[in-house]
Amino acid sequence: MVVNELINAGKLVLIIGGSHDLTLGQYQAYAENKRLIEASCVDALIDLNIDSPFRHENFLMEMLTGDPNYIRHYNHIGFQSYYVHPRMLETMDKASL
């Protein structure tokens, strides 16, 4: 709700820290306003685990595959390669986000 109000006021919103429910909530505020965004996450993991019932482990799937999609470009900074399956990296490269 706060992010939505800031967007409507024409402000640039940057959230630092917190859990990924904040990331998804911020994305949803832009999606509600039908605005394309460029998103960046700093995390040791790439949270695309579709088998997990926990939203913090699969929030990227919702962000990157939702229809309609408002992600123009996605950056993932700081992932640890020993936590990420090589096929997941291939998938991210093919998506060209």
Image: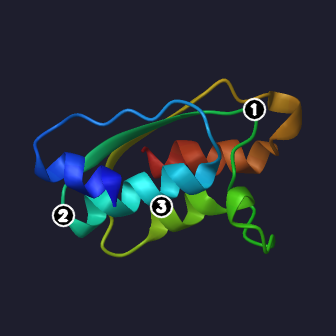
Q: Position of residue 80 (x, y in %)?
A: 79, 28
The answer to which of marks 2 and 1 sits earlier in the sequence is: 2
For the residues labelled 1 and 3, the Cα–Cα distance comes to 18 Å
Tag 3 secondary structure = helix
The answer to which of marks 1 and 3 sits earlier in the sequence is: 1
Q: Residue beneath label 2, please?
A: 33
Q: Is residue 66 left or right of residue 60?
A: left
Q: Nearer the viewer, residue 86 or 29?
A: 29
Residue at the far right: name it: 82
For the residues labelled 2 and 1, the Cα–Cα distance comes to 30 Å
Tag 1 secondary structure = loop
Residue 86 visible to an observer of this rendering = yes
Q: Is residue 62 left or right of residue 96?
A: right
Residue at 53% from the left image edge and 51% from the top image edge: 22
Q: Residue beneath label 3, please?
A: 63
10 Å crowding of disc 2: few (<14), some (14-19), many (20+):
few
Which amino acid does the dot numbered 2 rest on? Asn
Which amino acid does the dot numbered 3 rest on? Met
Residue at 18% from the left image edge and 64% from the top image edge: 34
Q: Residue beneath label 1, please?
A: 44
Query: Is label 2 or label 3 in front?
Result: 2
Residue at 72% from the left image edge and 70% from the top image edge: 50
Q: Nearer the viewer, residue 17 or 35?
A: 17
Q: Is residue 90 left or right of residue 29?
A: right
Q: Nearer the viewer, residue 55 or 62?
A: 55
For the residues labelled 2 and 3, the Cα–Cα distance comes to 15 Å
10 Å crowding of disc 3: few (<14), some (14-19), many (20+):
many
Residue 70 visible to an observer of this rendering = no
- State which quadrant residue 1 falls in: bottom left
Tag 2 secondary structure = loop
